[in-house]
Amino acid sequence: MNLKEATAEKHREAESLPFIKSIFEARVDKDQYADYLFQLGLIYYFLEEGLGEKFNLFEGMKDLKRHKHIIEDFNELANNNISYIAREPTLEYFNYLSTIGDTKKAMAHVYVRHMGDLFGGQQLAKCVPGSGKMYSFDNIRELMTSIRAKLSDDMANEANVAFDYNIKMLKEYS
């Protein structure tokens, strides 16, 4: 079974969650979405700057990094009357990422997060509040090819772990 097939069930589960459905239906609460961006900002920062630098995950694909775009989107939508803090599932995911000690495991998380931004993100960008800069890429096909060159089917278990953490994060908004 290839990587895409091995993660299809978790992918469908994530897409079926009420929060994601509300985004695709362009009825997501702006404050909830801003909070979600805050959570993503924490994860992407560590994935890109921590693990990314440690394992050279983004070599040849610097344009794939999303952290700064997530922060721009967050700043556009943030409500000054709300205190944004890391939620428990975000902390759990962050702590898990900090235990990853090899390139393949780290790349499985890039696959789930960033490949999702390249694919589904193109539809999400039309539905989210604000500019949706995190989903704006100049060279989608080239980036997808670059990611695929770093993937292998034996990353499936770890990619499903990434989906599990993503699902936990998304359920916070149900």
Image (cartoon, rainbow, N blue to C red):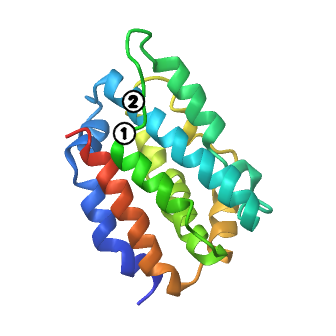
Q: Residue furthest top?
A: 81
- Name the foreground residue: 142 vs 9: 9
Q: Which of marks 2 and 1 is nearer the N terminus?
A: 2
The spot of residue 59 in percent (x, y) is 79, 63
Q: Is mark 1 on a helix, strand or loop?
A: loop
Quadrant of the snapshot with the N terminus: bottom left
Residue in the image at 42% along x and 80% along y: 157
Residue in the image at 48% along x and 46% along y: 122
Q: Which residue lies furthest to the bottom in this view?
A: 1
Q: What element carries label 2?
A: helix
Q: What residue type is labelled 2?
A: Asp
Q: Name the residue under label 2.
A: 35
State left or right for residue 101 relative to residue 63. Answer: left
- Name the foreground residue: 39 vs 5: 39
Q: From mark 2 to mark 1, how far is it between C-alphas?
A: 9 Å
The spot of residue 141 in percent (x, y) is 64, 60
Is there any visible trace of residue 33 in the rendered image?
yes
Per the rendering, the mark at residue 87 is 1
Q: Which amino acid does label 1 sit on?
A: Arg
Is there any visible trace of residue 128 in the rendered image?
no
* Residue 87 sits in quarter: top left
Is the C-beta separation of discs 2 and 1 under 8 Å? yes
Quadrant of the snapshot with the C terminus: top left
Q: Which residue lies furthest to the right in this view?
A: 60
The spot of residue 128 in percent (x, y) is 40, 31
Dot 2 crowding, Cα within 10 Å, few <14, some 14–19, many 20+: many
Residue in the image at 41% along x and 27% along y: 34
